[in-house]
Image (spheres, grey):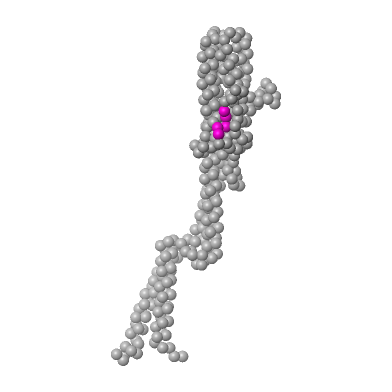
Amino acid sequence: MRITTANAYDAVVANLQRRQQQLVDSQTQLTSGKRVQRASDDPAAAAQAERALAWQSRVQTQQRALDASRNATQMTESTLGSAGELLQQAREAVVQAGNGSYSDSDRAQLAQSLQSLRDQLFALSNTTDGTGRYLFGGQGSDNAPFSNAPGGVQYNGTPGVQHTAGNEPSPLSVDGQKIWLQAPDPSNPGGTLSVFGVLDQAIADLGTPGRTPAQVAQTVSTALGQLDAVALNLSSARSTAGEALNRIDAIDQRLSQANVDAQQQRSSAEDVDMVQAISDFQAQQTGYDAALKAYATVQRMSLFQYLS
């Protein structure tokens, strides 16, 4: 077999180019930290990394929704706590109104205090989560869920609860109608009490002059029983919000672990083993240097060198 000088040079140059490309690829892996730069580098690993990336994206989306749910639930729990404190103040005012030495003027002043507490409670019932969503709007409403009307406070929201999407839905709102307007009435089985209705009645009775001690005592007794009922309903709703927060924390832990698992799967599929990559790069660099020296030596052994 006859090998011409040109063919030998072409073969050596092609081999040098291959070695140089391998060296460049190794250097690219080292600088980027990625073993798989293109899908063609390792189709199976690229597909695995893509699946892990898609799962990680879904997990992060669920985590953002869960953060919104946590924020709304925390605000709901805090708002109901504030409402409970206001109802306690209202109860103390009603107890004070039962003092037999109080005049109509004294009870009228207490009625004004109850009116102020009632207005604060009404404002709390229309609290938003900071993004425009009403905490007690049920399944959603563009307008405030509660409004004052001649017949009493009306609910304008949609009954029910709004949840996040996903395998483990979490609340974004609560059913304000059940919390504020439908407390079970202990004196009337099957009947309900409105926080605002109870206060409105107590305010009207205490603000009416010329009532007898017996009438005042009846007003105080009735108002105290009803205030305890609506306060218990608010407290129960607050406990439910606390339970929801515990569940949200548990879901968050699972999502965080799922995110870590997805990152590890993606890393194992496409990231380079730095120790092995450095070793390979050094070996390829040594081989490339040796090939260059061999080429330089062989190049000087051409027949033309002897004839010149």
Residue 284 visible: no
Residue 123 coordinates in the image, percent (x, y): 52, 28
> Where, by quadrant of the figure, is residue 21 drawn?
bottom left
Look at the image and say whether residue 273 sits in the magenta stretch: no
Residue 20 coordinates in the image, percent (x, y): 40, 73
Magenta segment main secondary structure: loop
- Which residues are drawn in magenta? 143-147
Relative height, residue 241 to residue 5 (above, below): above
Residue 254 visible: yes
Q: Residue at x 53, y 53 (%)?
A: 56
Look at the image and say whether residue 146 sits in the magenta stretch: yes
Residue 115 coordinates in the image, percent (x, y): 53, 20
Q: Residue at x 60, y 9 (%)?
A: 211
Residue positioned most to the left? 308
Quadrant location, the C terminus: bottom left
Is 37 in front, or is 107? Answer: 107
Q: Residue at x 61, y 15 (%)?
A: 219
Relative height, residue 148 to residue 63 (above, below): above
Is 256 in front, or is 164? Answer: 164
